[in-house]
Image (spheres, helix red, strand yellow):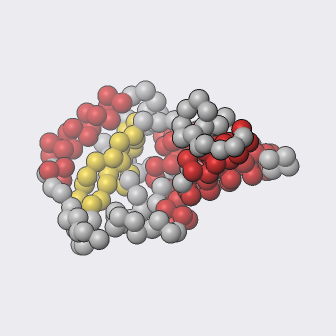
């Protein structure tokens, strides 16, 4: 049986995710020193080695996320940002828990738009972040999910279908995806990729 569901706290997922994920990245990457692992720069002293290694070893997006996370975890902002984001994460998880009392899987689009061209949105981080709206809440709730092809738009760009399952129930997701692929031919078709 197919039934429409509501996940009311999904609208807060992007904001919560980019606080939680960046804070955790900042916390974990604070240990990155370029000495034991990762890229190691050669400099005149230890402090300069750390600074150059971190500067050369991370791209602009990673640096942006580390800075956002460091800010969210800083004194005076922890409760205002990180703690509140964790509370939203709990609400999102509860939404899914309630829904999975009635459903075996949840099927959604993978993204709010069809695929964009390679490199098209790299200069607009906000647009890139908003493209994650349907997948971020799954990460926050700690649920398994997969995306598979389900068609193409008028410009020949692929459309993704996301199947979300209960915690530790990947086998049901795989069965649903397999049955969908057996009933359709989308997974056998390829988008046109133009040289840019």
Nearer the observer, 104 or 32: 32
Q: Residue at x 32, y 51 (%)?
A: 161
On-image quarter of the N terminus: top left
Q: Is residue 81 above or below residue 112?
A: above
Q: Is residue 20 visible?
A: no
Q: Name the residue: 50% across, 69% down.
A: 123
Would residue 9 be found to the left or right of residue 74 on screen?
left
Count of marks, rendered view: 0
Residue at screen point 14% across, 50% down: 188
**Which residue is farthest right?**
76
Q: Nearer the viewer, residue 56 or 96?
A: 56
Image location of residue 152, percent across then percent down: 24, 63
Residue 68 location (% of width, % of height) = 68, 54
Q: Residue furthest front?
A: 44
Image-based side of 122 in relation to 179, left or right:
right
Q: Quadrant of residue 141?
A: top right
**Where does the image place residue 179, in percent across and percent down from the top left?**
20, 39
């Amino acid at each position: 049986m197919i039934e429409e569901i509501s996940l009311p706290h999904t609208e807060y997922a992007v904001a919560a995710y980019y606080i939680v994920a960046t804070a955790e990245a900042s916390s974990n990457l604070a240990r990155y020193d370029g000495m034991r692992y990762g890229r190691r720069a050669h400099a005149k002293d230890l402090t300069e080695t750390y600074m150059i290694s971190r500067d050369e070893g991370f791209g602009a997006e990673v640096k942006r996320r580390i800075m956002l996370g460091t800010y969210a975890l800083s004194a005076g902002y922890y409760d205002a940002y990180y703690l509140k984001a964790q509370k939203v994460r709990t609400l999102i998880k509860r939404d899914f828990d309630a829904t999975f009392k009635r459903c075996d899987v949840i099927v959604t689009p993978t993204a709010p738009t069809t695929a964009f061209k390679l490199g098209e949105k790299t200069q607009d981080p906000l647009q890139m972040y908003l493209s994650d709206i349907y997948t971020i809440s799954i990460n926050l709730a700690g649920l398994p999910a997969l995306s598979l092809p389900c068609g193409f738009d008028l410009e020949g760009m692929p459309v993704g279908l996301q199947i979300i399952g209960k915690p530790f129930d990947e086998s049901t997701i795989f069965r649903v995806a397999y049955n969908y692929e057996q009933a359709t031919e989308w997974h056998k078709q390829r988008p046109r990729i133009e040289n840019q």
